[in-house]
Amino acid sequence: MPREIHWTDAEEIGIQLQEKFPEVDPLTVRFTDLHRYVTELPGFADDPAKSNEARLEAIQMAWHEEYEDAQK
């Protein structure tokens, strides 16, 4: 069973999103879609309503860092 992840686990979420969507440039993903992607991850155990723009942006940037590393 995957460990529980929460909105504040931006780095872990970024890694999981990169693994799940390796061809997607995170900077092209709308926050509404990003919210859905995160809440559908295995182990997501937070309240979906507790997301906010700052948390989604932190997740998007963590995912973008993973994406950039994978392009090298």
Image (cartoon, helix red, strand yellow):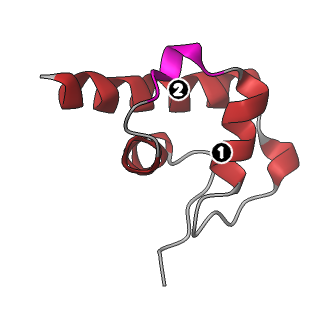
Query: What x and y, as percent, mark residue 49?
Result: 87, 46
Tag 2: amino acid: Gln
- Image position of 64 with respect to 45: above or below: above
Question: Per the image, is 13 magenta?
Answer: no
Toward the left, the furthest residue is 72
* Residue found at x 21% / y 31%: 70
Residue 37: image tag:
1
Toward the front, the furthest residue is 23
Q: Residues within 10 Å of mark 1 (few under 14, many from 20)?
A: some
* Residue found at x 79% / y 29%: 32
Q: Secondary structure at mark 2?
A: helix
Q: Secondary structure at mark 1?
A: helix
Toward the bottom, the furthest residue is 1
What's the magenta region?
A: 24-29
Quadrant for residue 37, please give it: top right
Tag 1: amino acid: Tyr
Q: Is residue 35 left or right of residue 21?
A: right
* Residue found at x 67% / y 34%: 34
Q: Which residue is mark 2?
A: 60
* Residue found at x 81% / y 44%: 50
Say which of 6 and 32 sits in front: 32
Query: What x and y, as percent, mark residue 21?
Result: 46, 41
Quarter holding the C terminus?
top left
Q: How far is the residue under mark 2 from the one under mark 1?
A: 11 Å
Question: Per the image, is 28 magenta?
Answer: yes
How many badges with numbers are in the image?
2
